[in-house]
Image (cartoon, grey):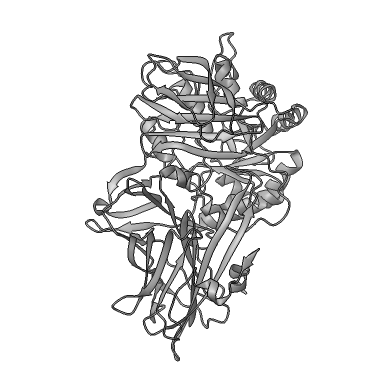
Amino acid sequence: MILKNILDMKQTLCLPAMACLAIVSCSCQPSADSFRVVSPDEALEVSIEKDSSGLYVYSFSDQGEELITSSHIGFKGKHQGMIPGKDWTVSASASSHDGVWKPVWGKRQEVKDQYNELTLSFKAPEGHQGISRIQAVFRAYKDGVAFRYVVPQEAGQSEETESECTQYSFAGDYTAWFYNGEYHNLGPDKLSEVEGERQPVMTVQAGENQFMALHEADLRTGEPLLLSSSKGDRTFQVASKPARLEPGYVSAWRVILHGRTPGEMVDSHLIELLNPEPSGDFSWVKPGTAVWDWRINGAITDDGFTYTMTYPSWVRMVDFAAEQGFKYLVLDANWYGPEFDGTSNPVSGGKTDDVRRILSYGKEKGVGIWLYLNDVGGRKYPIEKTLRQYREWGAAGVKYGFMNGTPEEKNAWTRKITRLCAENRLLVDFHDGPVHPYGQMRTWPNAVTREYCQAQLDAHRVFGPGTFVTSVFVNMLAGPLDMNNGMFDLRQGNTTRVDENKPVPSTVVSEAARTLITFSGATIIPDIPEMYRKYPELLAFLSAQRMPWKESRTLMGKIGEYIVMMRETDTEYLIGAATNEEARTLSIPLTFLPEGAYTVQLMLDGEDAHYLTNRETCQVRMQEVESGDSIPVRLAPGGGACLRIKKPDRR
């Protein structure tokens, strides 16, 4: 049944024998031990064969250039040796899929879902104890490849394993960057210099026009992916806690994203496509921008009003959100009592009465309210009852913080909460060291974002402009991120904010641009209305970000240096650009525009802007362009640019 679920995909076509030659080639004899599967455009190829010891290895190449060389697959059993072993027999089957995914929300309205698939079915020799059958399923897409392990139901007894033997042996001493929790990403490092365990996403530059990224997709059970390497080596090994193999077991997909530019990987949907389609109605899921009460706490306006995390401030934030067309207000910690206190009841404690009042007021104004829930309250009190109560109150979503447990336990709890939130029509955002995204937004469109990054206002000690233009090419490849971009109060010196009062190392134009560049189903902006109103053109840029996006495209980018992102709405094209600590001038191509003439509004850093010394200067101008033109823009150190291009009125 497990095999049928994987291979019997919607619109999957089992090819006739001659057509299969374009997908997989192998000997027709029962002892065949050499196979290959290629991408639909025949550029990417995975080859599988036996090595000199008789064990199975794969390699990965692009247009004949080998990027990953002979790398082992399989598991090491505790008692029965390698699975599959050198004396196991193998048979192969091939299929092809050509479909379209229409996400509820995402980077674009339609996504091509095209791949070629090869399934290798391994069988142990007679007398083998434990698992006697296992399959390795390989898929090749235009933007990467993936493989996973499946244990059929008729596979015999379960078996403990010492390790998963999956390897990634790179063909050269390439350059890599790695996710690093709530710190600046690790890298750029030469592969031979990496030692010990690293977390994905692992982004790799193999050449001027060769980029890869290692991650996983559809992690149903077990520990999230970890990678390890020894210094002086170019081989990375899956170091995650090994699985117990039993009938019906399905591993996560081991994914190798590929692009000729890093932006192609940013624009990829491969991670999502490797997850199951959703079941049920998710038409209620509405992505959008949210204001937030945590960072406003302590801010003082020119007329003397002090923002706090209380009802009067919530009303002002809801009014502002309604005025600007923002969809949500996020209420953060301590609304039901001290968040780490086990006696704080998440359905009756603290400011519950005021929370219910603002939920009602928000409904009148057309603004949904998110509620924070700490893991202490989430586990001490029945989570099913808590989330059902939030639904009955009319909450829009849940921000879940500080989850505890082993990585394996956290993944199981994350999956449970995501499912329960979906059942109660609640969006969900996981914070504070969450399990990495692995494409959940396809199966559960309510999983709109998570803090799989250094939220930029939490630790200025590590988050600088270079952090942003690295994390968008590393962390963001895993899925939607809640990075809390969009701080407009960038005055010199400390602010009156309660939680974090240090100056933000950015420019106001860059802050606006980052809200567009960062892919998220809930763009949570951190400042007070009065600071946004100081910059009406930039505020209008925030308000113009009406999701879901019709199309997204990374126009330019270099890891750790700069990025330029275009996102399309029903009425206009929005462009955001951001740079690292260096000033630069970029020539932004407009090749995405349909033929015709357009007027562009440019919001640029002031002439003397700098992310450390002069953050709040902005200049605005208009320019006439045509499709195919390029627009030169100057980015200040740590700065950015925002562009708006209205679509012609076709009426």
- Quarter occupied by residue 237: bottom left
Q: Nearer the viewer, residue 194 or 265?
A: 265
Q: Residue at x 68, y 52 (%)?
A: 384
- Quarter occupied by residue 86: bottom left
Q: Residue at x 56, y 58 (%)?
A: 114
Q: Nearer the viewer, residue 396 or 139?
A: 139
Taking the view exactly as shown, the residue that stands out farthest to the front is 595
Report x, y in % for residue 110. 63, 47
Q: Is residue 177 toward the left or the right of residue 306 in the image? A: left
Residue 95, relative to residue 383: is it above or below? below
Q: Quadrant of the C terminus?
A: top right
Q: Nearer the viewer, residue 439 or 337?
A: 439
Q: Residue at x 47, y 53 (%)?
A: 143
Q: Quadrant of the N terminus?
A: bottom right
Looking at the image, can residue 333 be seen?
no
Q: Is residue 377 toward the left or the right of residue 163 in the image? A: right
Q: Nearer the viewer, residue 263 or 427?
A: 263
Q: Is residue 471 toward the left or the right of residue 280 in the image? A: left
Q: Residue at x 58, y 24 (%)?
A: 598
Report x, y in % for residue 474. 42, 44
Residue 219, relative to residue 29: is it above or below? above
Looking at the image, can residue 581 be seen?
yes
Report x, y in % for residue 28. 46, 83
Taking the view exactly as shown, the residue that stands out farthest to the left is 232
